[in-house]
Image: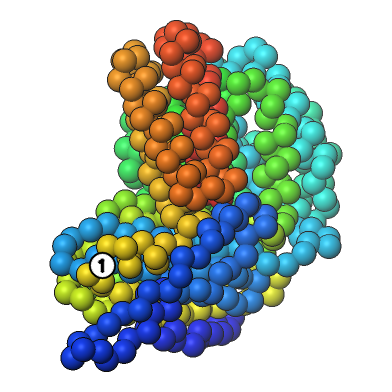
């Protein structure tokens, strides 16, 4: 398998707001450009890269993207925070979907008995019927242990033996790691040209005793090898932190379903996304100047190596972009230009199984003494995305306080977040901020009016968490 390397030309050092440096009165004078109109934030599916100041462009086969900072300038003389958005989009049109290898890891513990297991059986049957002859499928069930009901093989094999699915029964405990391990092992036998996807379905809390961190590390390793793991929670009794961690480590989707009847739609979506994948094994790296540090990341489980931030993105489907927000701590510096920043991506294009590496570097940001000049470097769409991610994190704290029964704190936090979103919308009036504001206003109302301990409130909180995660990713 060959590796092609693409180098993006180094960008010239950025001079804030297209400022002109001139000699005047024995000193340097920085001329400020006129204020510019705020651009609307991109909506999912219509995003396009903006190769402007404070931006590194990353483009290659089947990929378009950029690393963009919310400001191109920083205030000299003091430590501060700076945010950036890494956005990557899969390119190409899917005229006919490609074959996939799909492993369904289904909870058959005692809590699934009755309507849930009946609906799960029906959803699996309907999905298998949709699969093509050249697709491959494995069906894993787990309770106190895990078993391979159908080894990975042509979907036609299981289509001919659907009676095996209809005979699935519920009983026993909930050993999620055993199911994940067996499902991953099944997919390791898939031909290399197939897109590999594992879907975990659970309605309960893991009782294996295996530390979540150990499972997380295993899934990260599988994702790096090309296996995407999505997690689906049914009802309100499963551990939301556990399943979101599984999905994040596996670079896949997470969803909450109030009823098992909705499972068929989720499985159909997973099959369609796997078939529309144009890129997998996508890993991005952002290299910072000495002394700069990562504070927080949203949208991926990142890892740091010195001044480098490794960002596992996983798979991209055609026409959809992925977003990762980085919040950085920048040490104090005198006026002038920062040391260069760089970004790179490594990935595989699914259609030809080629591996690619793209590098972009040489970006410098300006340290300025005039706060107004710093504000002139605002990138409004990126600022909206990065600030919105921070507010979403604080809103998650409000909903957690509500879950614990601390309605006063939850209400105060939610009202603060609503006001912050109104202020953000005034600065960056984008569609994304408006929809986030509407969701926050609804949450604030429900916190005030809905009993925190009610099943309806728990269902609402989980649905809100799913929406928040989608905003973070896309």
- As displayed, is residue 34 above or below residue 217? below
Q: Nearer the viewer, residue 409 or 259?
A: 409
Whether residue 227 is visible to the viewer of this picture, yes or no, is no
Looking at the image, residue 472 sits to the left or right of residue 414; the answer is right
Q: Where is residue 262 in the image (x, y as percent from the top left)?
A: 69, 27
- As displayed, is residue 455 above or below residue 35? above
Looking at the image, residue 340 sits to the left or right of residue 146; the answer is left
Q: In which quarter of the image is residue 96?
A: bottom right
Looking at the image, residue 391 sits to the left or right of residue 29; the answer is right
- As displayed, is residue 203 above or below residue 329? above
Q: Position of residue 428 (x, y in %)?
A: 49, 50
The crowding category of the residue bearing disc 1, from other C-alpha atoms within 10 Å (few below 14, some 14 to 19, many at least 20), is few
> How is the structure coloured here?
rainbow
Badge 1 marks a residue whose secondary structure is loop
Point out the image quarter for the N terminus.
Answer: bottom right
Q: Residue at x 45, y 38 (%)?
A: 421
- Residue at which label 1 appears: 370
Q: Quadrant of residue 148?
A: top right
Whether residue 391 is visible to the viewer of this picture, yes or no, is yes
Q: Position of residue 417 (x, y in %)?
A: 39, 33
Q: Position of residue 260 (x, y in %)?
A: 66, 22
Q: Nearer the viewer, residue 192 or 8?
A: 8
Count up the numbered dots: 1
Q: Residue at x 43, y 31 (%)?
A: 418
Q: Residue at x 57, y 54 (%)?
A: 41
Q: Which of 384 and 269 is in front in this view?
A: 384
Q: Residue at x 54, y 30 (%)?
A: 439
């Amino acid at each position: 398998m060959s590796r092609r390397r693409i180098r993006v030309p180094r960008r010239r050092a950025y001079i804030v707001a297209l400022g002109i440096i001139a000699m005047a009165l024995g000193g340097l004078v920085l001329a400020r450009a006129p204020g510019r109109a705020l651009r609307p934030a991109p909506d999912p599916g219509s995003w396009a890269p903006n190769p402007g100041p404070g931006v590194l462009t990353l483009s290659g086969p089947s990929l378009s993207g950029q690393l963009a900072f919310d400001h191109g300038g920083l205030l000299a003389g003091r430590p501060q925070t700076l945010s950036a958005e890494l956005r990557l989009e899969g390119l190409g049109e899917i005229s006919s979907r490609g074959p996939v290898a799909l492993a369904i890891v289904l909870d058959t513990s005692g809590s699934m008995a009755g309507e849930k297991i009946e609906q799960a059986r029906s959803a699996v049957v309907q999905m298998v019927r949709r699969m093509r002859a050249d697709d491959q499928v494995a069906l894993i069930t787990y309770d106190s242990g895990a078993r391979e009901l159908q080894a990975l093989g042509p979907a036609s094999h299981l289509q001919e033996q659907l009676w095996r699915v209809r005979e699935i029964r519920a009983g026993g405990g909930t050993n999620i790691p055993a199911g994940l391990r067996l499902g991953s092992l099944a997919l390791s036998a898939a031909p290399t040209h197939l897109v590999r996807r594992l879907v975990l379905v659970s309605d309960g809390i893991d009782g294996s005793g295996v530390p979540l961190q150990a499972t997380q590390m295993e899934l990260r390793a599988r994702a790096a090898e090309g296996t995407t793991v999505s997690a689906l929670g049914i009802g309100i009794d499963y551990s939301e932190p556990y399943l979101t961690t599984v999905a994040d480590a596996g670079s896949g989707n997470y969803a909450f379903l109030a009823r098992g009847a909705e499972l068929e739609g989720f499985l159909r979506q997973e099959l369609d996304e796997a078939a529309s994948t144009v890129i997998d094994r996508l890993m991005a790296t952002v290299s910072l100047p000495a002394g700069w540090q990562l504070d927080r990341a949203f949208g991926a489980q990142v890892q740091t190596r010195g001044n480098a931030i490794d960002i596992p993105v996983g798979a991209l489907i055609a026409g959809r972009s992925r977003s990762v927000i980085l919040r950085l701590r920048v040490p104090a510096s005198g006026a002038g230009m920062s040391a260069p920043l760089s970004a790179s991506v490594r990935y595989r294009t699914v259609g030809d199984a080629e591996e690619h590496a793209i590098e972009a570097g040489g970006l410098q940001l300006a340290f300025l003494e005039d706060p107004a000049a710093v504000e002139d470097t605002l990138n409004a769409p990126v600022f909206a995305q990065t600030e919105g991610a921070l507010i979403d994190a604080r809103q998650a704290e409000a909903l957690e306080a509500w879950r614990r029964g601390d309605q006063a704190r939850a209400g105060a936090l939610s009202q603060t977040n609503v006001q912050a979103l109104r202020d953000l919308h005034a600065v960056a009036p984008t569609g994304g901020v408006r929809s986030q504001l509407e969701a926050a206003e609804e949450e604030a109302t429900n916190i005030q009016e809905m009993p925190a301990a009610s099943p309806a409130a728990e269902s609402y909180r989980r649905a809100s968490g799913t929406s928040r995660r989608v905003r973070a990713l896309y």
